[in-house]
């Protein structure tokens, strides 16, 4: 495998995740829409910790901030943190069966959301509705499917 | 096992230091960004550039939906077009009949309050804008419109539709602007109950069909069906624009505040087109402007600088009322009742 090939796959999947994030949906789906970009960053920091890792998380976070953040740097910090968890624990997470992975992903996404929640509160844009925690759950639920799709993006056809 | 592509087990070393150190660096940079963005307005320029950079992506994401709408429109049947045409013509006729005596009434009103000329209309310019169909944030009520600084749009500008108040612009880019809707949980709109003139604040409830009036005491005179209009405080909307209709009033004997909900008139969830309004600040009906708030920021060349003598008088009369203009940020204090005072010439 060449060094550039995971980078191209990363770029493609990040763009795909961004489109899924911005796509307008009916409002009941809107509420449970998982953080596609967070899942993508987490996947790549586990699958290719050296190619993307924390830098990828930080750049994706800035991109997300450009679209929806109340303060610049909010998602950048949270996604860098998520990527850090992924990179640090990548060997342990990889060796687990997929359902245990989902549980770990759930915990990581909760950490991610806690960081966002704290920054929201600190910057005076607090959003206290319990609905904000729903995407954490749906993100963990679709993790097996998301991981399978993201894996195909790197080695298409295998 | 989700097929993780790279070979497992290789030690993570090499360029860039340990992941912990790298995360620490990025965290520091992010926190610096947040502080700069939040406490100082150093990143205003960066916001502007980002809005410009992200606009093509937002357009691209919304294009399939726009194409679908266009296709629907172009394959509309003759019958449905005729029906729509008929409906619009009826509506136009109704509006024309209703506005027939408007000029005469404006003259009469001016005479009654002791002005020689009738008041100039409060809106000086308006511009339709399309809502770009993308999701900015699922839990906050924000939309993106396709007008920006090239069209003269500034931050804190009123956005209406043909039924009522929609919201106001927040971040403005060169070709696009982010609009915060009145139903956003962070948006507070100074309103008055039309029937009684009672002033209060309407706060967004987080879904596009309801507003909350959290600061009304339990003995306040408010009923289901009351119409809420803008009160003119807060500096964005002139008084009298329709906002919402009260749908729910709960008065609990043990609670000091009443629980009141209202449904906005504007079709916030189905609108695809809204109106941006520029108000004249030299008419007595203009909204009170905050002097130092971020609402006054933006393109100053669009705001009238020369104040005519008559307006200076009314400006002075308005001074004691200026704390009320801060209502949007400090809603609990009862506003000193200060209608824009018309000074006779």
Image: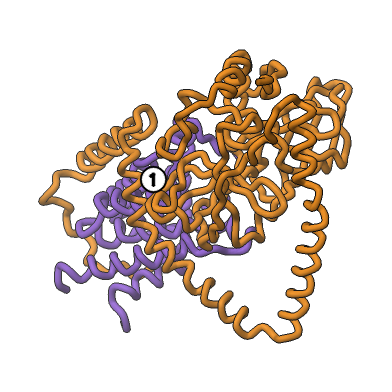
* In the rendered image, the vertical position of residue B78 relative to residue A12, given as above or below: below
Q: Chain of mark 1?
A: A
Front in this rendered view, residue B254 or B268 = B268
In this figure, which residue is indicated by the disc labeled 1? A75
* Residue positioned most to the front: B116
What residue is rendered at 51% in x and 39% in y? B156
What residue is rendered at 54% in x and 61% in y? B130
Q: Quadrant of the N terminus of chain B?
A: bottom left
Front in this rendered view, residue B178 or B311 = B311
Q: Residues within 10 Å of mark 1 (few under 14, many from 20)?
A: many
* In this rendering, position of residue A112 left or right of residue B110: left
* In this rendering, position of residue B274 left or right of residue A100: right
Can you tell which chain is drawn orange? B
* In this rendering, position of residue B8 left or right of residue B289: left
Residue A21 in the image: x percent, y percent? 46, 60
Can you tell which chain is drawn purple? A
Q: Quadrant of the C terminus of chain B?
A: top right
Front in this rendered view, residue B311 or B161 = B311
* In the rendered image, the vertical position of residue B271 relative to residue B235, given as above or below: below
Tell me if I can see residue A64 in this picture: no
How many numbered discs sit on the rendered protein? 1
- Colour scheme employed for the rendering of this structure: by chain
Dot 1 lies on which element? helix
What residue is rendered at 37% in x and 27% in y? B39
């Amino acid at each position: 495998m060449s060094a550039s090939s995971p980078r191209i796959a990363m770029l493609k999947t990040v763009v795909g995740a961004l489109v899924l994030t911005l796509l307008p949906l009916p409002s009941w789906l809107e509420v449970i829409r998982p953080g596609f970009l967070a899942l993508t960053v987490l996947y790549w920091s586990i699958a290719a910790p050296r190619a993307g890792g924390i830098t990828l998380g930080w750049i994706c976070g800035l991109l997300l901030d450009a679209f929806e953040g109340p303060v610049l740097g909010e998602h950048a910090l949270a996604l860098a943190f998520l990527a850090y968890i992924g990179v640090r624990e990548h060997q342990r997470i990889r060796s687990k069966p997929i359902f245990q992975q989902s549980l770990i992903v759930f915990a990581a996404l909760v950490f991610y959301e806690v960081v966002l929640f704290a920054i929201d509160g600190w910057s005076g844009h607090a959003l206290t509705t319990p609905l904000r925690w729903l995407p954490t759950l749906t993100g963990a639920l679709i993790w097996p499917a998301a991981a399978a799709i993201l894996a195909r993006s790197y080695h298409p056809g295998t | 096992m989700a097929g993780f592509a790279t070979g497992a087990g290789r030690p993570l070393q090499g360029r860039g230091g340990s992941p912990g150190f790298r995360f620490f660096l990025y965290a520091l940079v992010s926190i610096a960004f947040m502080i700069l963005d939040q406490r100082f307005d150093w990143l205003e320029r960066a916001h502007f550039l980002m809005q410009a950079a992200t606009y093509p992506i937002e357009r691209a994401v919304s294009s399939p939906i726009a194409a679908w709408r266009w296709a629907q429109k172009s394959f509309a049947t003759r019958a449905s077009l005729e029906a729509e045409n008929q409906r619009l013509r009826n509506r136009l006729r109704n509006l024309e009949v209703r506005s027939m005596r408007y000029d005469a009434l404006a003259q009469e009103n001016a005479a009654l309050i002791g002005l020689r000329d009738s008041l100039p209309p409060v809106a000086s310019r308006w511009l339709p804008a399309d809502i770009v169909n993308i999701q900015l944030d699922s839990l906050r009520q924000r939309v993106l419109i396709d007008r920006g600084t090239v069209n003269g749009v500034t931050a804190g500008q009123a956005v209406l539709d043909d039924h009522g108040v929609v919201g106001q612009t927040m971040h403005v880019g060169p070709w696009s602007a982010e609009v915060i809707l009145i139903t956003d949980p962070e948006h507070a709109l100074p309103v008055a109950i039309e029937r009684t003139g009672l002033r209060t604040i309407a706060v967004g409830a987080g879904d596009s069909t309801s507003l909350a009036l959290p600061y009304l005491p339990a003995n306040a005179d408010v009923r289901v069906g009351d119409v809420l209009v803008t009160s003119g405080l807060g500096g964005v909307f002139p008084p009298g624009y329709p906002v919402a209709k009260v749908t729910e009033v709960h008065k609990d004997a043990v609670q000091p505040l009443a629980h009141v909900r209202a449904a906005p008139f504007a079709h916030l969830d189905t609108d695809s087109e809204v109106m941006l309004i520029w108000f004249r600040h030299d008419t007595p009906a203009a909204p009170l402007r905050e002097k130092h708030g971020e609402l006054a920021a933006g393109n100053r060349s669009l705001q009238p600088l020369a104040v005519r003598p008559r307006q200076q008088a009314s400006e002075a009369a308005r001074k004691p009322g200026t704390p009320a203009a801060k209502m949007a940020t400090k809603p609990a204090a009862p506003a000193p009742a200060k209608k824009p005072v018309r000074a006779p010439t």
